[in-house]
Image (cartoon, grey):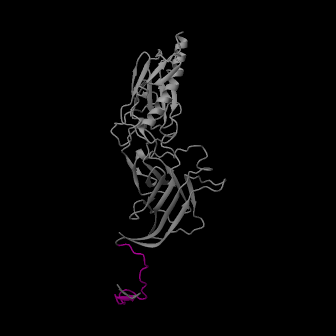
């Protein structure tokens, strides 16, 4: 099948919302084409191609999609939902510090409640173990992402009394659980990828430990199972409401789930773009990297363009109004081609009109400079 471009033009898009009453948001933009005649005739299709995309990375690497986990112990058997602070980190060591500090605050609260109930001496503090004034937490502060460390997080929390001496914490059965979908809220969490532990598929599982937890009388040691990551997202995905001829695995569509993610089906993904430290930017090389054909649509009135992560979830916002009053938006150059397609045995010109019966006429006629039978 051969193709010929009949007409072509660029659409420059800036999703910065502007109007307070607009239905569009900075990461979910409705492109109104009612004032433009975007039509395809018989034998023609509309093709949309992403020529250029850019946006500032105004979301943090640790965010609402990868920061939440559950802490359980003998004092709070129902579990406490904890959350790492939303921020960027230049080393795994700093992620480990945030993890340790988040745990120690809650464990101190639980230990005091447990020891109060048992009429025992209350711990005054819970701190990361230090040797010669240096915290024994791995990876160490000097280990960069590409350094010699294996990037596995581990640390020991020591409970101390008012004299700064080790004291009993009274806790047993301590579990750190990395759920794919959190209990009660059913929110997604990719924290298992961020910190390096085992994911838990079923949110009613209260017995599985995602990392190794070792209990001492006065301390608790936490050791993750796999190398940690500074972020869990490699790409920003641009999606559309148009029926696409592109295909994708189901793992790119419906958030965290425990069913088969190898199935392939039609997708609404228009393009994906690498996340850098400050910007997300893409420029077409061949011009055909990211495109969709619309074989059944003859006219376009509206195109919805919206951003998601690799599970089809909206990008995490730092604050609720970041994509309306704030700075979460994108710029896009969308190329639109009207393409004439020709297939064998398919004609696009009307048949020759003969003025005499075929038995009396010359079988060869001249029309438009061509000889026709």
- x, y percent for residue 331: 53, 58
Question: On screen, 71 above or below 172?
Answer: below
Give the magenta part as a residue range.
345-366
Front residue of 299 and 280: 280
- Residue 113 found in image quarter: top right
Location of the C terminus (image quadrant): bottom left
Residue 189 appears in the rendering: yes
Q: Is residue 349 magenta?
A: yes
Q: Is residue 344 magenta?
A: no
Question: On screen, 352 above or below 287?
Answer: below
Q: Main secondary structure of the magenta part?
A: loop
- x, y percent for residue 213: 40, 24
Front residue of 199 and 61: 61
- Residue 198 found in image quarter: top left
- x, y percent for residue 195: 42, 35
Residue 299 appears in the rendering: no
User: Which residue sits at x=54%, y=12%?
Assistant: 117
Front residue of 54 and 294: 54
Location of the N terminus (image quadrant): bottom left
User: Which residue sits at x=59%, y=43%?
Assistant: 319
- x, y percent for residue 335: 48, 65
Left or right for 320, reference 260: right
Q: Residue furthest front?
A: 132
- Residue 207 found in image quarter: top left
């Amino acid at each position: 099948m051969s193709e010929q471009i009949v007409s072509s033009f660029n659409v420059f898009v800036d999703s910065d919302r502007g109007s307070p009453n607009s239905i569009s948001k900075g990461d979910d933009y409705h492109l109104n084409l009612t004032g433009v005649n975007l039509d395809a005739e018989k034998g023609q299709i509309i093709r949309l191609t992403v020529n250029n995309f850019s946006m500032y990375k105004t979301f943090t690497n640790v965010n609402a999609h990868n920061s939440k986990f559950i802490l359980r112990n003998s004092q709070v058997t129902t579990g406490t939902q904890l959350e790492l602070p939303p921020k960027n980190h230049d080393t795994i060591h700093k992620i480990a510090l945030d993890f340790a500090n988040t745990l120690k605050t809650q464990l101190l609260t639980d230990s005091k409640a447990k020891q109060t109930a048992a009429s025992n001496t209350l711990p005054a503090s819970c701190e990361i173990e230090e040797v010669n004034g240096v915290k024994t937490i791995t990876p160490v502060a000097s280990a960069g992402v590409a350094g010699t460390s294996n990037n596995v997080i581990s640390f020991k929390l020591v409970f101390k009394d008012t004299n700064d001496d080790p004291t009993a914490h009274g806790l047993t059965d301590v579990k750190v659980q990395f759920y794919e979908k959190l209990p009660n809220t059913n929110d997604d969490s990719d924290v298992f990828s961020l910190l390096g532990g085992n994911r838990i598929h079923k949110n009613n599982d209260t017995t599985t430990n995602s990392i190794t937890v070792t209990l001492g009388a006065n301390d608790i040691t936490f050791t993750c199972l796999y190398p940690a990551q500074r972020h869990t997202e490699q790409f920003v995905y641009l999606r559309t409401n148009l029926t696409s001829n592109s295909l994708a695995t189901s793992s790119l569509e419906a958030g965290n789930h425990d069913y088969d993610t190898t199935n392939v089906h039609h997708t609404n993904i228009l393009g994906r773009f690498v996340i850098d430290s400050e910007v997300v930017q893409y420029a077409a090389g061949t011009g055909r990297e990211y495109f969709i054909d619309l074989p059944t649509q003859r006219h376009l009135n509206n195109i919805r363009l919206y951003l998601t992560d690799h599970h089809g979830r909206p990008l995490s916002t730092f604050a609720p109004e970041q994509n309306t009053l704030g700075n979460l938006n994108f710029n896009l150059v969308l190329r639109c081609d009207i393409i004439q397609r020709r297939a064998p045995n398919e004609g696009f010109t009307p048949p020759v009109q003969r003025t005499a019966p075929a038995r009396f006429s010359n079988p060869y006629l001249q029309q438009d400079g061509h000889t026709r039978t």
